[in-house]
Image: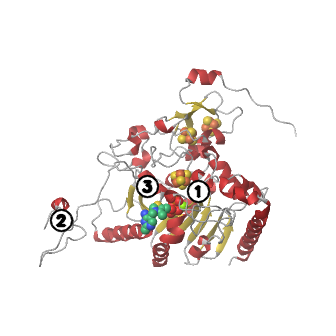
Amino acid sequence: MAITSIKNLKEFSTNNDRFEGAHTLCPGCAHSMIVRELMNCTDDNLVMTANTGCLEVSTAVYPFTTWDTSWMHIGFENAASSVTGSEVMHRVRKKKGTLPDPDAPVKFVAWGGDGSTFDIGFQWLSGAMERGHNFVYVCLDNENYANTGGQRSSATPIGSTTSTAPAGTHSYGEKQKKKDIVAIMAAHDAPYVAQLAPNKWKIMAKGFQKALDTEGPCFINTVSPCCTEWRFDPKDTITITDLATDSLMFPVYEIINGHELNILYRPKNVLKVEDYLGAQGRYKHLFKAENKHVIDKIQKDINEYWDMLQRREEARI
Amino acid sequence: MQDLKLLAQDNRGLYQLEAGEDLLGWHEVTQGSILPSFEGDATGIANMKQEERNYSHYNSYTATVASWRVLKPVYNRDICIDCQNCWVWCPDTSIISRDKQMLGIDYDHCKGCGVCVEVCPTNPKSLLMFGEHSSFEDALSQWPEKKKKEKK
Ligand SMILES: Cc1ncc(C[n+]2csc(CCOP(=O)(O)OP(=O)(O)O)c2C)c(N)n1
Ligand code: SF4
Ligand code: SF4
Ligand code: SF4
Ligand SMILES: [Mg+2]
């Protein structure tokens, strides 16, 4: 594929954005940072689809489109189905010789929020991965149904308050553990699966280029801090992402062919999860004395998960 | 074959198939809604700068969100090292960079989030937030001095 240079940020910045301004995402929203990082990784033609969610509603406000590529929206749950349908149509028309420019390189990319990826579009995604289409699915994981007012999803982490699992006198908020979507996608025997973060732009761009360049179904979960629902100042989106990766709340790693696990970012100083939680309003209640056990539990889970990742990396299983 | 536009005007709301009538094939139906991002051929867009492109009026590039701003980022060329941090993390494609140089801010699309200021590494910063209605001369004349490193 025609990849663009990501050697350093100056070279990366010579790319010509294909995601325009005047979309209606909140100021400081990480969704568009992630989209721009991916789209600037290649100058191939892109065919993109999106599930319903903040990214989709904010970039297709009739009569406007924010996308300089082919982009399609059908329903909440079927970005994976529509992108793989497009991919098959492209393949068939190429074979039949009905494409105007059959040699033009095309990449197929689907976007989904965590709600549509972990929950409502889960079976469509699983089917597309299992059928082995040639596409990249990117989940913008902001750990809640942001576009409809911050309901919990199966990506919502323990202790976070949401509109459907609120913290209060009787509850510390979310009780269920976050679904391990990366492991589930790797279990589909996908050639490339990763969890990436927009603050680490180079690791992210490398991962995106690898996924775009890999034959077969690829899945990438990206941490997408949502200032509105996570409750932080919009200017701090990258600071919060730094806290997420450096506290290992969001470890950055890839899994190749379902088993070869590589940790892509090892923080020099691992931060306590308290630093990450304390910077966001959605975890404020955890700092009350009676909820301290929840913070301890989150820290314990993080330590165990990091330990597991390191062992898997070493064992190559 | 029935014209779908006529069907849409049918005030019964639902179109009922007459006996023996065929359904339209997938390749025959009128598309729901297509917004072309460009006038004419869009080939090679990835290798064209924004100012070289022929945007259609459907492209949100032709729209503005300037009225969202309360504060605006002001750019001070004298201190900038062209690191491009502000370019990569601006969520609104509003940092104008050409040939590895930061040129300024696209105020039609900037929402004033302040991320660019936060990620700017220079001392003092090359980008700072000022009130939307303050003048650039005023802003630049108030630029802070270099901060001394605090001794630990
Ligand atoms: C089948 C269906 N169920 C529910 C909705 C309502 N809905 C629209 S956007 C949205 C939230 C999407 O959340 P997520 O996928 O996490 O994306 P985010 O907005 O957080 O980026 C919901 C529930 C819908 N449009 N269709
Ligand atoms: S609610 Fe969150 S995810 Fe949605 S646009 Fe706002 S900041 Fe972005
Ligand atoms: S204030 Fe926000 S939108 Fe405006 S240029 Fe800076 S980062 Fe971009
Ligand atoms: S972040 Fe600051 S120093 Fe870097 S290019 Fe932008 S304005 Fe210049
Ligand atoms: Mg979400």
- The spot of residue A251 in percent (x, y) is 68, 63
Left or right side of B64 for B148: right
Left or right side of B98 for A103: left
**Mark 2 surroundings within 10 Å by alpha-carbon count, few (fewer than 14), some (14 through 19), many (20 or more):** few
**Mark 3 surroundings within 10 Å by alpha-carbon count, few (fewer than 14), some (14 through 19), many (20 or more):** some
| Amino acid type, label 1 | Ser
Is A199 above or below relative to B131? Answer: below
Separation of residues labelled 2 and 1 (CA atoms): 45 Å
Q: Would residue A51 be seen by someone viewing this image from the given angle?
A: no
Q: Chain ID for label 3?
A: A
- The spot of residue A156 in percent (x, y) is 61, 65
Provide the residue designation for mark 3.
Answer: A57
Is B121 above or below relative to B34? Answer: above
Provide the residue designation for mark 2.
Answer: B12
Look at the numbered disc 3 and say if its residue's Cβ is closer than 8 Å to ligand 1.
yes
Look at the numbered disc 2 and say if its residue's Cβ is closer than 8 Å to ligand 1.
no
- The spot of residue A103 in percent (x, y) is 36, 61
Provide the residue designation for mark 1.
Answer: A224
Question: Could you tell me which quadrant the N terminus of chain B lies in?
Answer: bottom left
Please tell me which residue is depicted at 76% across the width and 31% down the height of the picture. Answer: B147
